[in-house]
Image (spheres, helix red, strand yellow):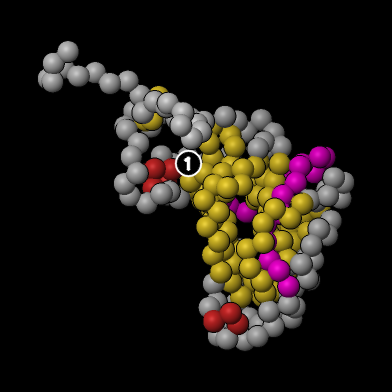
Amino acid sequence: MDWQNLLMWSKAGVEASSKGALTSVRSNPVDGSLYTSQGGKYSQAALGGRLFGISSQVAVAHTAAYAATYTGLAVGNPSGSGVDCSLKIMSFAPSVVSDANGTVGIMGGVYGVLPIVSALAIYNQKLDGPLSKCTATGGQTINAAPAPTLLRITGSTGTGAVNTWHGASVISCDLDGSIVIPPGHFWASYCFMLSTAALQFSFVWEEVPI
């Protein structure tokens, strides 16, 4: 081997690891480029066309907790999609004064016999990237059994004016990939109390090939 002819192999895609383990250099499975820590932490997923997002286009009247006749913002990962959904960001904001105080978060569950219908447009965060494998809705009947589960509390809603509540009108929770939704499951916005059409929600996630 000489310095002019050095050949280095890397492993494409995601690799499971643990502290102290020997791992290979990782590369992009699409173009073979070497992964590094430079740039924004979601930039590689965005540039690779694996980062997706959806936002409520108008304020929604949100049902309380696990109501079967759900309204809010829900995203489903269909059975057979071939991807895991790694949740990155959940944000919400009041557009008008709410009529209820209570926690806001993310709930998740299994499809059962009621998959999430494709009613809302999901956007690749690389605007010319491929279509999402997921489906999204602003409201539909969801499974009563097994019931969804509250996965993460991300903030709260209040009855104060939008310019005084919490001192800021937008709450954004960086999940950093700490929640993964496999095929046949869904996630959705959660409000502890019934709310009038006051809140808008958004999700950002990465679709990782299985």
List x then y, in percent, for residue 76: 67, 45
Q: Residue at x 53, y 78 (%)?
A: 168
Magenta segment range? 102-122
Determine if the magenta segment contains residue 113.
yes
Q: Which amino acid is tagged 1?
A: Arg
Outermost residue on the right side: it is: 145
Q: In the picture provided, is 89 more to the left or to the right than 45?
A: right
Outermost residue on the front side: it is: 20
Quarter of the image containing the C terminus?
top right
The kind of secondary structure element at disc 1 is: loop
Quarter of the image containing the N terminus?
top left
Whether residue 57 appears in this view of the structure is no
Q: Residue at x 60, y 30 (%)?
A: 82
Determine if the magenta segment contains residue 19.
no
Q: Nearer the viewer, residue 45 or 119?
A: 45
List x then y, in percent, for residue 99: 74, 81
Q: In the picture provided, is 9 more to the left or to the right than 135?
A: left
Q: In the picture provided, is 52 more to the left or to the right than 25?
A: right
Vertical comparison of 184 with 190: above or below: above
In the figure, residue 30 lies in which quadrant?
A: top left
Vertical comparison of 95 with 184: above or below: below
Vertical comparison of 204 with 133: above or below: below
List x then y, in percent, for residue 98: 69, 79
In the figure, residue 22 lies in which quadrant?
A: top left
Q: Please count the marks in the image.
A: 1
Q: Residue at x 85, y 45 (%)?
A: 146
- Residue on which the image places disc 1: 50
Q: Dot 1: within a 10 Å radius of its alpha carbon, few (fewer than 14), some, or many (20 or more) residues?
A: many
Q: In the picture provided, is 4 more to the left or to the right than 202?
A: left
List x then y, in percent, for residue 180: 61, 43
Whether residue 106 appears in this view of the structure is yes
Q: Residue at x 73, y 73 (%)?
A: 102
